[in-house]
Structures are given as structure tokens and as C-alpha cells.
Amino acid sequence: MRLTALIPALSPELVSSLDKCGVRTDSDLLFRPVVEVYLQLSSEDGISLLDLERAVELTAELASAPGIAGDELLAQETQAQEQAPTLFSGVGGLDNLLCGFGGCRVIEITGDKQSGKTTLALNVILRHLSEVSQARIAWIDTTGDFSVEHAAQILKTFNSEATSSALNRLQVSLAFDIEAAYNALEESQPLVSIRHSTRLSCIVFDAITPLLGPLLSAVSAQGHSAMTEFMYHLRDFSRLHSCPILVINNTSLLVHHSKSASQIRKPALGPSFEFLTDATVWLSRCDEHAKFDNDHDFTVVSAKVLRSRTTAPKTDSMFKISKGKIFDL
């Protein structure tokens, strides 16, 4: 931080005198002996050693990150969690994995192809919209594949009072690049105000991979920096507005020398991405458990928590999907 940014807390005359000595930033002032800096000052400036020592103390205070007591931090966290919406899938075992999909969290949903990632997110938000008449959801579509007809079919299976207005409170935005995603978030901010008749309860990115994947490069760290900045922005948004965010992440093949492991998949966007979210849920199809009869066609899916800041990791549960709706197994 340049010392000029600390004016008027530091007097302009003092900052000007220090600049003549080559002391222009807080690091220049804090990490050099005070006496050494004092001896370099001109006597004509009329700055005493006591004045310089006070300036050093003030600079250290202004340049430091503000501290907060543990009990105050706990109170803030508790209040934020109480204000955050609670979203459930309706599948007991699945909801127990993460204590629901609400809270001030960014939750990554990833897994095999056609394992029901979008279906899970859609069921979670449609259930919430059908049960809470004041809820509003922002769905950010990055592939153009969102189907309102499919959403309407799922809604028909809910019998809650707010079902009839659910689609009216589902805001779908298209975002094919990172800038459009930032703009979509900006447009969502007015909806988080508690003064609105309806309040934003969740944001879904389907999927996050097309936004961030093209930025990553093996020869430059700039893309990784942009990815990190965007995910930090999502986390700050979630905690500031008590709004959970679900991000759907695609997968890529795991590079392995063994031919038998050539089809093993892993979450896309690199190993560091899971540390930019609060929880990661991995979905995989269990074809050996699939059931078929004349009336129903079920897809059995296993959900496993790979990582979580708030619940136990490496726990799993199974559920089934039939005609776009998820059920207990």
C-alpha cells in the first residue's frame, strides 16, 4: 500500500518527506529501522523521532487486516445460517449427507455423464419453489439446454400450494462466458433484499465448466487466477446475502498409464477447484441396481460427499430417478 493512500491519517507533509527518502509504501516504512529512516529525513522538515514513531504505529494499524473476536464471528455465522434458506431434495438419505442444500454455501455437484447432476439440482429448486411462495431461484444456463417443459413436468408431481406460481419465480439467464456470468449475478442482487415480496433463495450454475474451462491453460496461470477470483466472488455473494449456490461441474478422463483405468473420470477444472467450494457431491450411475418393469423405468444413482467443510466427508447415499423426478431407493 502506498503511503499516499493513508492521507489524511498521515499528514501530507510527512508523506512527502518520506517520499524524498525513498520510503513510499507501508512495507518501506514498517520493515526498516525507525532510526535509520529518521536519519534520512531533512532537519528542515521539522519531523521529530516521536512523530515518526507514531506514524509507524498508525501505518501498521491501517495496513493490517481488521481483527474480530471469536464470539462475534460465531454470532455472525449463526445469524447468517438462520437467515439462509433451507433447501431439500426430498430424499432423506441424500439430504442427510449435507444437512440439505441450503445455508451460506457453494456446493459443487459433479459426477459421471448422465448421472443426474442437472436433475438433482432441478428437483431441489423446484421443490423449494413449490413449497415456499416467497422464494425465487436464479438458474444460470451456460449451455442453452434448459428445458422449461421438463421443469413443468416435474412440477406437476408436487402438490404444494405454491406450485402454480413456481415457474413465475424461476429466473433463467443465459451466460456463455465469464463476463455474462458476472452480469447475471449483478442482476440477481436486487432480489436478495428482504424488502422484496419474493426473495432469492438459491442460484444454480448449469454448468460451471463451460465458463471456466476455456480460461485454463497449461502454460499460463492467468486462467487459474480468473477461476479463483470468480469462485471467491460466488462465496462472498453467498455469505453476504445468505444465499446458497449450486454449481454443476462436468468431468474429464483421469490420465493413467494403466489401460484398465483409462475410463476413470474425475471432476473437471483441476484438483484445486474442489477447495474453492464448501462441499463436493459426486454422482455415479449404479446400472447393476437399475430396475425395470412395465410401469416404471428407474435409474439408480449413488451420491458421495467427496469433501465438505460442515459435514462428514466420504459418506454416501443412493436414490433413484424416474421421469426426471428423484425418489428414495
Image: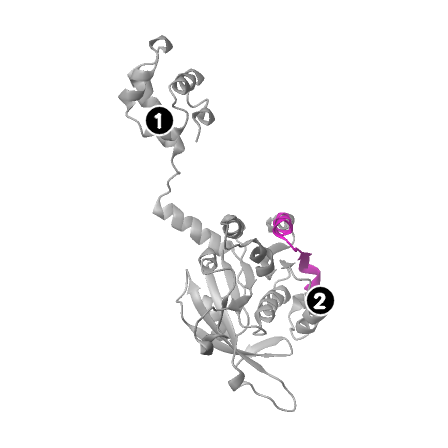
Badge 2 marks a residue whose secondary structure is helix
- The answer to whether residue 107 is left or right of residue 136 is left
Q: Earlier in the sequence, mark 1 or mark 2?
A: 1
- Tell me if I can see residue 240 in this picture: no
Question: Mark 2 belongs to which amino acid?
Answer: Val
Label 1 with label 2: CB-CB less than 8 Å: no
Residue plotted at (28% across, 21% down):
36
Residue 207: percent from the left, percent from the top?
A: 60, 62
User: Given the image, on which type of amino acid does mark 1 rest?
Assistant: Leu
Q: Which span is picked out in magenta?
A: 165-186
Q: Quadrant of residue 2?
A: top left
Q: Is residue 279 left or right of residue 250?
A: left
Between the residue at mark 1 and the residue at mark 2, the CA separation in whole angstroms equals 60 Å
The residue positioned farthest toward the top in the image shown: 44
Circle 2 Cα neighbour tier, 10 Å, few/some/many (<14 / 14–19 / ≥20): few
Task: Work out whether 209 lies above or below 117.
Answer: above
- Residue 148 is labelled as 2
Name the residue nearer the viewer: 13 or 36: 36
Position of residue 282 measured from the top left corner of the image (x, y, whole percent): 49, 70
Q: Of discs 1 and 2, which sits in the foreground?
A: 1
Tell me the crowding category of disc 1: few under 14, some 14 to 19, or many 20 or more residues within 10 angstroms, Cα based: many
Q: Residue at x 51, y 81 (%)?
A: 286
Q: Quadrant of residue 140?
A: bottom right
Q: Helix or strand or loop: what does disc 1 sit on? A: helix
Q: Which quarter of the rendered picture does the N terminus lie within?
A: top left
Q: Which residue is mark 1?
A: 29
Residue 14 seen: yes
Is residue 180 located in the magenta-colored stretch of the structure? yes
